[in-house]
Image (cartoon, rainbow, N blue to C red):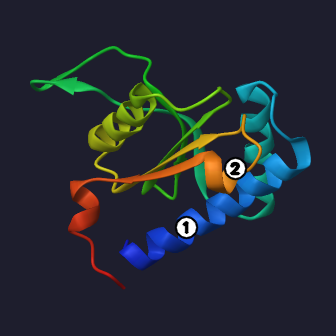
Amino acid sequence: MKITKAYLKDLTYQFNAAAIEVHKTLGPGLLESIYHQSLIHELGIRKINFESEFVIPVTYKGNILESNVRCDFLVERCMVVEIKSIEEFAPIHEAQVLSYMKLLKIPRGLLLNFNVKNLFHEGQKTLVNEYYTHLAEH
């Protein structure tokens, strides 16, 4: 399957729909781990291919480092998703997702905060990088 901007847009829409369903059902204010487990269940229902707690290999000057760097979700091997349940996003949260995307050579990332009233308007950021700019439109 060829990854295109249109494919990533659709995948983002599908993942956001699953996250909104979890948020609508549970509401804000719970632990991140509860939202994580609920998303695993919801993504399974929707048949979205993902890996949870994906270990990100870190290489420095040709040496593989021992690290325990994990992203919450690696979706369809082309989108990194980090979930939070915090008061508000901080610049470090975006930096974290962008670093994961760079290490994995992934074109798109999502940052979700479940501790908001409206997940779609307040609790979601979509991030892209140089790998995204080189993708075909369709």
Q: Is residue 97 left or right of residue 110?
A: left
Estimate the spatial distance between the alpha carbons at disc 2 and disc 1, rounded to whole Å: 17 Å
Badge 1: residue crowd in 10 Å (few <14, some 14–19, many ≥20): some
The answer to whether residue 48 is visible is: no
**Is tag 2's residue or tag 1's residue first in the polypeptide sequence?**
1
Residue 60, disc: none
Residue on which the image places disc 2: 119
In the image, what residue occupies the spot 33% across and 57% down? Answer: 107
Badge 2: residue crowd in 10 Å (few <14, some 14–19, many ≥20): many
Q: Is residue 122 above or below residue 1?
A: above
Amino acid on which the number 1 mark rests in the picture: Leu
Secondary element at image label 1: helix
Residue 67, image x, y percentages: 37, 16
Q: Is residue 42 left or right of residue 9?
A: right
Could you say which quadrant of the image residue 33 lies in? top right
Q: Are marks 2 and 1 in contact (CB under 8 Å)?
A: no
Residue 25, image x, y percentages: 90, 49
Residue on which the image places disc 1: 11
Could you say which quadrant of the image residue 96 lies in? top left
Q: Is residue 119 above or below residue 134?
A: above
Q: Residue furthest top?
A: 66
Q: Residue furthest left?
A: 61
Could you say which quadrant of the image residue 28 lies in? top right
131, 55: nearer the viewer: 131
Quadrant of the image for the C terminus? bottom left
